[in-house]
Amino acid sequence: MTTPLRIGFIPLVDAAALIVAVDKGFASAEGLDVTLVREVSWSNVRDKLNIGLFDAAHLLAPVAIASSLGLGHVKVPIAAPFNLGINGNAITVSPALHAALMAEIDGGDRFDPMATAKALARVVAKRKKEGADALTFGMTFPFSTHNYQLRFWMAAAGVDPDEDVRLVVLPPPYMVDSLASGHVDAFCVGAPWNSVAVDLGIGHILHFVSDILVRAAEKVLAVRQVWADKNPQTVAALVRAAVKAAEFIEQPENRAEVARILAQPERIGVDAEVIQRTLGGRLKISPDGTMRESGRYLLVGREEAGCPDPVQAAWLYAQMVRWGQTALSPEALKTAMGVFRPDLYDAAVGRPSQTGQAAGGAFSAFSGPVFNPADVVGYLASFAVARRGP
Amino acid sequence: MSAEQSPKIVIVDESPIRAAILEEGLREAGFTQVVHIREMQSLLARIYSVDPDIILIDLENPSRDVLEAMFQVSRAVRRPIAMFVDQSDSASIQASVEAGVSAYIVDGLKKERIKPILDLCVSRFNAFAKLQEELERTKSQLEDRKVIERAKGILMKMKGLNEDEAYVLLRSTAMREKKKIGEIAQSIITASEMLK
């Protein structure tokens, strides 16, 4: 007997494990008859998952946590039994901002986020003095990794993301147009949109997010907690299908086929070659053709990327606190960590996994102390720029 | 509505027809202050300048995520805005999401004043969806009729039939093959073009 499932996704490369699980038959081999539904906004994905129009979804990791805490919307506890992607975002800036940053980098390494953040601080100060408009940065959602990654980066050099620049939400498919029209000066978004901007000659990839955070949980496979409790077999089957798809995606000899699958119009719908670049972590970062390669650009199945790591959830929760989206509470921290479910992952694959941190080292970033979920207060106290509240 | 002024409503929808249907419904129900925003660039700035009590947005619109940013503490926001539906309103969320519309409400507006607006939204959105379906169906019926006319002409010419006989032949073949008459007609046209 097959189990019919409706799963929502946003057309981004980190939905790969889900798309390949369905289109390559890993899901049907597990007895699942999955209908993938392409969505246009994270709010839609969240709402349709919450009310049961979707059984599961490709979801921003912070949205899964916010939903479980009732932040920004109704409270619906979410379980994430599989991590769809680690890293994968990039910061892209307009040619004008890129030139301004490079002029202010002062001999620093342009791939060093501290050097670029300091350059940004100088550009911001100069613009203020000249009475120019504040720089505008696009990101995808208030509860998004992109929001927190941009903030983390610029705040390290003293740029206050709420006072010194403007952060605006933009749907990923609108990012490129908005950069071209000058509506934003930069954006942080997932693949393939950074590459699309570079190919059009209107953007430079300034950073891979892996420059800023060594290992950052990005999207999760999300289900309602009550649904997971009621359907443990289905959850396990879905996780196994995603694990197999992730393994398939990570084989370099499969990349061309994977890119073709993802490129289909009803999936991501952009050029397969662009998708393949991001899967391989070899990206054109500048319109002049400069390439940059990183083995950490996007992890789909490598280094136990698929296993949800509660420490990642704790860090994301800490960012919500740092930027005033919620007040710190030990119960909420526990709830947030409980959204990421390595136990469900282990049950599905039938072996104890190493959690991500154990596999990939401590949670570290280019600035600030190593994150310790047992001391969120101490961790947050180490950052000068913050917006405590509400 | 003299005691309480009609709330200011913004409709964010790129479909002018659907927005017009909704706006008309709202006006008929006595909500006189309705503004339709079609332009998605600088959406928030436009919304702030209208300063609405209620924002209605269709779910096909990617800019819905932009509206979510209004919940955030930000110096741009003068009044906090909350998602209409609170914890107890799951039936309302369900109905509106299924109909394809979402509502954002400025804090402080009484719940009993919101309910009829949302109900109206849901029914108008559903009506629009039905209208579109009908339109599609009519279109394909028209298309079918054209194809059948052409197939009849081919049969009449090639088999020396009159119009009624040609139609009967088409219909009986469709019944035998368990196919639509339009499909049989299309295959006749395709075949005759190949044999030209």
Image: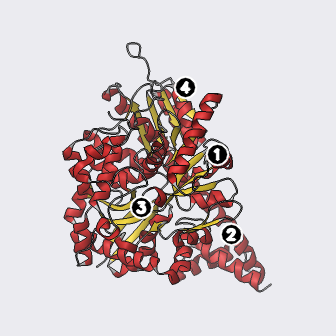
Question: Relative to residue B155, is residue B144 depicted above or below?
Answer: above
Distance CA(mark 4)–CA(mark 1): 29 Å
Vertical relation: A93 (above or below) B122: below
Label 4 sits on a secondary structure element that is helix
The one nearer the camera, A6 or A320, is A320
What type is the residue that disc 3 sits on? Val
- Residue tagged by mark 2? B147
**How far apart are labels 1 and 2 at the CA level?**
58 Å
Q: Disc 1 marks which amino acid?
A: Leu
* Quadrant into which the N terminus of chain A falls: bottom left
Closer to us: B116 or B73: B73
Is A201 above or below relative to B9? Answer: below
Residue where numbered disc 3 is placed = A214
Question: Comparing marks 4 and 2, which lies closer to the viewer?
Answer: 4
Say if residue A323 shows up in the picture: yes
Residue mark closest to the camera, 1 vs 2: 1
How crowded pointer 4 is (Cα within 10 Å; few <14, some 14-19, many 20+) is rated as few
The residue pinned by badge 1 equals A97
Can residue A170 be seen here? no
Chain under disc 1: A
